[in-house]
Amino acid sequence: MYDIKEIIEYPDETCPKCGKKGMMHIHHNSTGIMKCNHCNYGVATTEFWPIQLDETIYSLIIRKIDNISSKELNVIKKIINKSYPEIKELLSSGDYICYKGKADHIAKYLKLLKDNNISYEINPKYDYPDNQIEYASSYSYIDI
């Protein structure tokens, strides 16, 4: 819904405290704030995107790579805690499940693969828009 930060002025919206018109809505990540431009009355709330609430365990699968480049190896090494020769062997043998986790945790690894044009598959179907994937991939708590 809100990528980084969004401020929307509502000049005709009435403040519940002072009764004057002129409210501002501020959105940052999953926080929403409604604030009066006159008396500074404000209310804050949180909003969560579906990607943050999804409890499904997904499998992120890297598709078979016959001639893996050093760039691809370096990217995949950030996801798979194995040596370069092991990664080469795993991916030349066939598809490899590199991570299992919830939707918001998968996002960081998915972004890494997408940004580097590495072929992947996710099971079950992972149908989140790019802005939610981008948002969830920015979380700092995901271990890589």
Image (spheres, rainbow, N blue to C red):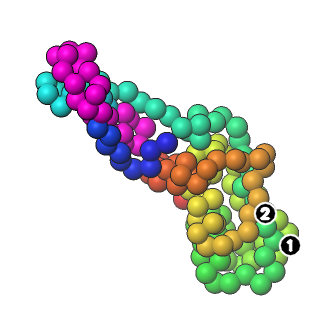
Q: Residue at x 24, y 20 (%)?
A: 15
Using the image, tell me which numbered label, if any, was put on residue 46.
none
- Foreground residue among 21 and 67: 21
The residue at which mark 2 appears reads as 96
- Type of residue at label 2? Tyr
Q: Is residue 23 magenta?
A: yes
Give residue 89's quadrant in the image. Answer: bottom right
Give residue 111's quadrant in the image. Answer: bottom right
Does residue 140 lie above or below 94 as drawn?
above
Q: Which residue is drawn at 55% across and 48% down?
A: 132
Let me know if residue 111 appears in the view: yes
| Left or right placement of residue 107 versus residue 32 in this view | right
The reply to whether discs 1 and 2 touch (Cβ–Cβ < 8 Å) is yes
- Type of residue at label 1? Ser
* Residue at the extreme front: 12
- Foreground residue among 92 and 40: 40
Question: Tag 1, which secondary structure?
Answer: helix
Q: Which residue is drawn at 81% across and 80% down?
A: 66
| Left or right placement of residue 47 versus residue 7 in this view | right
User: Rounded to the nearest whole Å, what is the CA distance between mark 1 and mark 2?
Assistant: 9 Å
In the rendered image, residue 4, in percent from the top left (x then y), is placed at 39, 50
Using the image, tell me which numbered label, if any, was put on residue 93.
1
Let me know if residue 89 appears in the view: no
- Foreground residue among 96 and 130: 130
Q: Residue at x 72, y 55 (%)?
A: 60
Looking at the rendered image, the quarter that the C terminus falls into is: bottom right
Q: What stretch is highlighted in magenta?
A: 10-32
In the rendered image, residue 142, in percent from the top left (x then y), is placed at 52, 51
Q: Residues within 10 Å of mark 2 (few under 14, many from 20)?
A: some
